């Protein structure tokens, strides 16, 4: 779905020359109709003259309807202007269109035209070029292209009542547990049966040895109550313990630790007084109007020399960088950066740097930064 622009810049308001040109074109059309009606009334018949005056009345109703519902008269249509609400940039409607015309007629009729000149000077000095009749009904005259161009896409806001979703932390890969080394099974050692030792046997001599008489064998028994010493079984062979294999190397990727950058605070510091901390758009001047920039704040400066306009400039921070924009001021905006002098143009943002000196007329502001 397409939308139209809801805010305009200082260069989108119609100039006094453009507005005077539109009034002259509207007046020329009415003058032609009056001449034709006068010729019909004087040279043909009374009925034809009445028809002419009725045509002028119908033309006036058509112009009023077009101004109230579409924002333009024939003259404004030709010049490329629109009469719209100062806040919504929508047509002002029948009631406010009639009231605006009555105020303009009173300014012109009661002052013999001098009021129109004063009203034009008032409009030329106003930030939104509003005359008394515009201020009375909260209307502005802007370029048609400023109203017809698409508005920038607005960021999608989170639905009311919906809580933000917090993502769970990313789990890191855990290496598998090291299994216990396999011990080979060792067959059990068979138990050695006990060895029974009999009584000692005397040595056997040769059967026939000349001259030697063999003595009868004597049987020696162990003393009573003394048991033969038991035979000790050999100890089993020691089984070597296998060496443990080294743990596997973890090849998974680990999450890096992110360190958030330090927050930088920008400010504009006057020579005397408290500085202005930049956060969003701020309208600066001797008597600034924050309504000129929707969603902005206002910051008044104390300028005894009165070189600062009531609404002089707009400052702000975008993507961490400060900027300034001249808002159709009388004495302009100048940025001194070392030996360089930068002239800030109306309607264009100029990026500021630390230690820049900003001149609003003769009023100095220094760009400061802190983290």
Image (cartoon, rainbow, N blue to C red):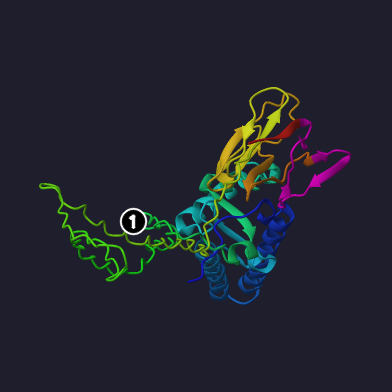
- For the residue pair 26 and 31, the one nearer the viewer reads as 26
Comparing 263 with 29, the one in front is 263
Residue farthest to the front, as pictured: 211
Above or below, 40 relative to 249: below
Residue 336 highlighted magenta (yes or no): yes
| Residue pictured at 59% horizontal, 62% vertical | 147
Left or right of 160 in this view: 360? right
Q: Quadrant of residue 316?
A: top right
Specify whether 67 is left or right of 111: left
Residue 351, x across and y down, in percent: 73, 48
Q: Is 199 situated above or below 226?
A: below
Instruction: Give the residue drawn at x 71%, y 28%.
Output: 270
Magenta stretch contains residue 50: no
Chain part drawn in magenta? 335-363
Residue pictured at 31% horizontal, 64% vertical? 211
Q: Quadrant of the C terminus?
A: top right
Q: Position of residue 5 (x, y in %)?
A: 56, 61
The residue labelled by disc 1 is 162
């Amino acid at each position: 779905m397409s939308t139209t622009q809801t805010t305009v810049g200082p260069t989108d308001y119609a100039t006094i020359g453009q507005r005077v040109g539109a009034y002259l074109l509207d007046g020329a059309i009415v003058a032609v109709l009056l001449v034709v009606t006068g010729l019909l009334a004087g040279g043909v018949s009374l009925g034809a003259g009445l028809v002419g005056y009725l045509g002028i009345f119908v033309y006036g109703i058509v112009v009023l309807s077009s101004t109230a519902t579409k924002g333009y008269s024939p003259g404004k249509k030709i010049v490329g202007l629109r009469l719209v609400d100062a806040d919504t940039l929508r047509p002002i409607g029948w009631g406010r269109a009639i009231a605006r015309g009555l105020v303009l007629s009173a300014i012109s009729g009661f002052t013999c035209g001098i009021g129109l000149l004063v009203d034009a000077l008032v409009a030329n000095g106003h930030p939104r070029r509003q005359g008394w009749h515009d201020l009375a009904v909260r209307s502005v005259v802007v370029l048609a292209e400023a109203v017809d161009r698409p508005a920038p896409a607005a960021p999608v806001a989170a639905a009311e009542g919906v809580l933000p979703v917090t993502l769970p932390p990313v789990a890191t890969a855990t290496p598998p547990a090291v299994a216990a080394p396999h011990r080979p099974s060792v067959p059990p050692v068979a138990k050695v049966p006990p060895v029974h030792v009999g009584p000692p046997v005397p040595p056997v001599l040769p059967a026939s040895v000349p001259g030697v008489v063999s003595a009868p064998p004597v049987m020696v028994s162990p003393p009573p109550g003394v048991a033969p010493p038991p035979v000790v079984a050999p100890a089993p062979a020691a089984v070597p313990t296998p060496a443990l294999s080294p743990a596997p190397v973890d090849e998974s990727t680990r999450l890096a630790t992110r360190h958030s950058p330090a927050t930088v605070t920008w400010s504009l510091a006057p020579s005397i007084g408290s500085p202005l901390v930049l956060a969003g758009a701020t309208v600066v001047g001797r008597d600034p109007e924050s309504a000129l920039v929707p969603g902005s704040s206002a910051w008044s400066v104390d300028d005894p020399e009165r070189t600062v306009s009531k609404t002089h400039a707009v400052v702000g921070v975008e993507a961490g960088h400060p900027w300034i924009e001249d808002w159709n001021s009388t004495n302009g905006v100048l940025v001194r950066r070392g030996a360089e002098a930068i002239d800030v143009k109306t309607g264009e943002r100029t990026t500021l740097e630390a230690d820049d000196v900003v001149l609003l007329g003769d009023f100095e502001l220094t760009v400061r930064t802190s983290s």
